Image (cartoon, coloured by chain):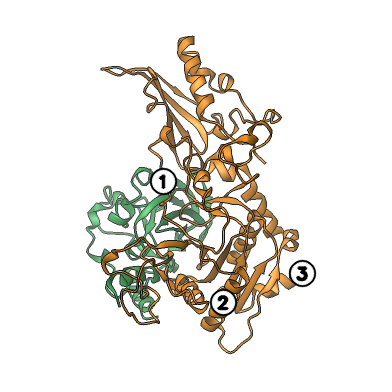
Amino acid sequence: MSSAQWTEELAKPVQAYTSTSRDPYLNLSIEHDILTRSASDSLVLFLYVNRPSVIIGRNQNPWLEVNLPLLNPKREQAEIDPAGLGAVDLVRRRSGGGTVFHDEGNVNWTVICPRDQFTRDKHAEMVVRALRSCGIDRARVNERHDVVLDQGQVAGHPDPEDTHSTPYTMPGGDGPTPLKVSGSAYKITGTRRALHHGTCLLSSPNLRIIPDYLHSPLRPFIKEARGVESVSSPVGNILLDSDEFCTAVRNEFARMYSPGEKTPLRAIGEDLLKFGTVAAGYDELRSLKHTYEQTPRFVLSNESDELATTVVDFTIREGRFAHASVYRRGSEPKQIMEVDFPNSHGPKLHEMELLDPSADEGSESWEDALMPLWQGLASAESEKLVSWLRRTVRQGWQA
Amino acid sequence: MMASRAIQRLTTLSSRSLRPTWQQAPRTSHPTRTFCVGARAFEKKYTEDHEWIEIGSDGKTGTIGISTYAAKALGDVVFVELPTADLEVSKGETIGAVESVKSASDILSPVSGRITEANSVLEEKPGTINASPEGDGWLARIELSDVSETEGLMDSQAYTKFTEEAEEH
């Protein structure tokens, strides 16, 4: 496709695309290109599948949400328990909300519309109608704007058009917990466009190991984290063929926005990376700066390590060490020292002692990077703290 | 329609039950008004993107925030991305973003100028935007490069009418 053809596509009042790429950075960049460049009153559907990846929300903390050492296991780490999936990408998306795991067993659906037509439920309802048209009669939208499948026995006979209850919905929220099959996240731009996307779990083979990826070993040592924490929900596979799902969603989208007209799903993909706007978004999403340095402020601390007699609270701002506060534990905690790292120039947490021995560049030793701190402490105290950092902040190989 | 659904519909910016209530907001609560003595030279102006700006008594520094109407439509704000001081912006450019109920929403500058201060209260207490969107929940201060840009904005009466018309959609 030429740049002119893509621009022409983006000008159409109703557009439907499917991606041939499995690259999460590319698919999210294409999605962003559509969001920012499609005609202001246009309605767009975009369906795509990503290779195994962990996608965090715009204002989330990867050290808190993600098991970073598990993402890119290699060599001596290969015996990691439980067995992982090989390389898994970490992506910070541009929309809000929580962390989600993507793989070939789920289809990501996106609807972009004018802001004044947007509601948080509208397109979750669209997906529910699509699922029901495939015979998934337990599907409904819940109060968190997620799509869930009710479990259990028939409990009532609601209006079949009601996308917020099914015959299996128990009054008052009683009964077995519904299983989440698709979340929701949104981005609303200054150009008065609204994006709603979700990840529909159809047949992921990885449901058992996904929780291992989403439990951070660093979590006990992070406090006062600003930003957005994920809310975990029990999930389930719908057990639906992805082509069947895509066709049903396309049909429902077309019924809403272009009844009686043909709205074919146009295949797009890697080809679009040659366009400047897509390439710029792609480079940004892939950058470590975007992934790590957008992290809202938090404190990394060994306070919860009960054996530690010297406790240090590191304030991490924009992914960098900004401040360290050290005190001695005891019946009367005693402040030992405060260290300020130069404004916006402190060492980057994501560059500290990468597990990959080949990553000489950008991999700093704890001893060197936090020198101003060690200088004020007895060497035994310093050694203990370095050893704690080395044990705790284990970061995976970075792609 | 179920009650829970009615709450979700707030995101449409079109729920009848949610009249903007800023008309009743005590003007004295606004930080820039502390030094404002005598007759009001500049009144609060609004954009179609639901931001407000109020010019201080010096006639060239404005305080920017989002309207009560927008704050209600957004729902509980859990994170605010603030502009940094000295940022030069043009009218309509993004100066920040808020996250609420899984939505990341851009905030635009109603005017061109240089950001002089961001409201650091919002870093720790983002919910201040919901509690006091047109007072303590202000977002940033800006030194305007062209004060006449505010002339194209709506006054409170016009803005109320604008939001009421939006509701009728």
Q: Which chain is orange?
A: A
Find disc 2 in the rendering and name its residue. Answer: A248
Compared across the picture, whether A64 is left or right of B3 comes to right
Q: Give how far apart the Cα atoms at labels 3 and 1 are.
A: 44 Å
The residue sitting at the right extreme is A2
What amino acid is found at the position of numbered circle 3 in the picture? Met
Q: Nearer the viewer, mark 3 or mark 2?
A: 2
Q: Give how far apart the Cα atoms at labels 3 and 2 are.
A: 26 Å
Residue A57 or residue A105, whichever sits in front: A105
Question: What residue is at 52 percent from the left and 30 percent from the top?
Answer: A393
Q: Give how far apart the Cα atoms at labels 1 and 2 are.
A: 47 Å
Question: What residue is at 33 percent from the left and 54 percent from the top?
Answer: B129
Find disc 3 in the rendering and name its residue. Answer: A1
Count of numbered tags: 3
Image vertical order of residue B162 relative to residue A335, above or below: below
Q: Chain of mark 3?
A: A
Q: Chain of mark 2?
A: A
Residue A152 on image: x %, y %:
36, 67
Are discs 3 and 2 both within one chain?
yes
Question: What residue is at 54 percent from the left and 41 percent from the top?
Answer: A293
What amino acid is found at the position of numbered circle 2 in the picture? Ala
What amino acid is found at the position of numbered circle 1 in the picture? Ala
The residue sitting at the bottom extreme is A260
Q: Which chain is green?
A: B
Is mark 3 in CB contact (under 8 Å) with mark 1? no
Residue A347 or residue B70, whichever sits in front: A347
Task: Check disc 3 and report its element: helix, strand or loop.
Answer: loop
> Mark 1: few, some, or many residues within 10 Å (few <14, many ≥20)?
many
Find disc 1 in the rendering and name its residue. Answer: B118
Are discs 1 and 2 both within one chain?
no
> Mark 3: few, some, or many residues within 10 Å (few <14, many ≥20)?
few
Tell me which label, 3 or 2, sits earlier in the chain: 3
